[in-house]
Image (cartoon, helix red, strand yellow):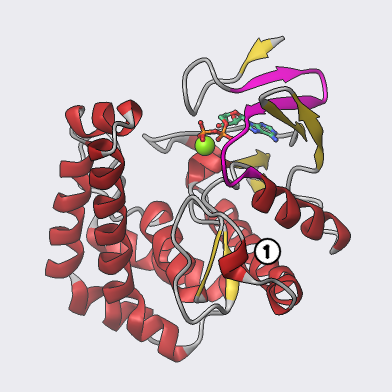
Amino acid sequence: MEELSGGRKSAIYRDDEVVYRPLQSWSSTIHLILKHLEQENVEESPKFLGINQDKEILSFVAGNTYNYPLVGAITTNKALMSAGGLLRKIHDSTVSLLDQLDVNAHQWMLEPREPFEVICHGDFAPYNVALLENTVVGVFDFDTAHPAPRIWDLAYSAYCWAPFKTDSHDKLGTISEQVARAKLFCDSYGATESEREQLADAMVQRLQALVSFMRSEAENGNSSFADNIEQGHLQSYLNDIEYITENKNKIQHALGN
Ligand SMILES: Nc1ncnc2c1ncn2[C@@H]1O[C@H](COP(=O)(O)OP(=O)(O)O)[C@@H](O)[C@H]1O
Ligand SMILES: [Mg+2]
């Protein structure tokens, strides 16, 4: 059994074509989503295969994986465009599940946010996808999935892929390059005029929600979030909120069609 890096330490293991991940209180909800995506022929997502004691068993999604700082295939326009297209495909596929789901009867890691347009992945970032050459062919880590408007996921993904990050380890390119990448992501997603207009504000709101979530998890004794805050990740999000706010006009101007 091989430990998979790129996420939590000592938590995710691979055995040939299968991945073992820790079961959480919301896992049964995520399994419903993964089963639905399989029925809808979204071959890019892991299949739910079963449960073994305190682990969920998922199919291994083949491909190369990346993390910040973004270097190589993950920085190409082709990767960006295929990512935007895949996010759209996942969102569209979840509409029929949401129609038949009583959102409040299920547990979620991240709080559902109205209006419930789609089920958002919740962390559709370069470190949660798999590539073959320059094309995104897979996505994993659905724990953060939750019902929300499309813009909620589009905003966080554009933030991660542009990326509008200021941390010296995570940053890539100039503001002009970042807004051009955000536009390409929105174009590939097929974002509406109204979604483009809302994007900068939605990125800020999404990051504020993330900061509140990290604080409340840490206060409730979740040590990995306390460590995260200790390591300066929360401060980085606050810095990025400031950066996006300062550049709001540039972002909005560039995103328009
Ligand atoms: N189904 C999967 N197929 C392929 N790789 C996976 C799969 N699940 C997880 N991984 C790998 O394990 C790493 C950590 O798993 P992930 O599900 O992202 O958990 P975390 O919540 O800790 O980020 C990922 O970055 C990826 O490289
Ligand atoms: Mg991950």
Residue 175: x and y in percent read: 24, 60
Q: Quadrant of ligand 1?
A: top right
Residue 39: x and y in percent read: 87, 60
As rendered, which of 84 and 58 lies closer to the eye? 58
Q: Residue furthest front?
A: 105
Q: Residues within 10 Å of mark 1 (few under 14, many from 20)?
A: many
Q: Residue furthest top?
A: 1
Kindly identify the residue that appears in the image at 20 percent across and 74 percent down: 248
Mark 1 residue type:
Ile
**Residue 18 lies in the magenta-colored region:** yes
Kindly identify the residue that appears in the image at 20 percent across and 36 percent down: 168
Label 1 residue SS: helix
Residue 75: x and y in percent read: 47, 46
Q: Quadrant of the N terminus?
A: top right
As rendered, which of 240 and 232 lies closer to the eye? 232
Q: Is residue 38 placed above or below 127 in the rendered structure? A: below
Q: Is residue 104 placed above or below 107 in the rendered structure? A: below
The residue to which callout 1 is attached is 90
Report which quarter residue 178 is drawn in.
Answer: bottom left
**Residue 22 lies in the magenta-colored region:** yes
Report which quarter residue 157 is drawn in.
Answer: bottom left
Q: Quadrant of the C terminus?
A: bottom left
Residue 36 visible in the snapshot: yes
- In the image, taking residue 237 as reference, residue 69 lies left or right, namely right
- In the image, taking residue 37 as reference, residue 71 lies left or right, namely left
Residue 137 visible in the snapshot: no
Count every numbered label the image shows and give the total.
1
Highlighted range, magenta: 12-27
Residue 130: x and y in percent read: 64, 40
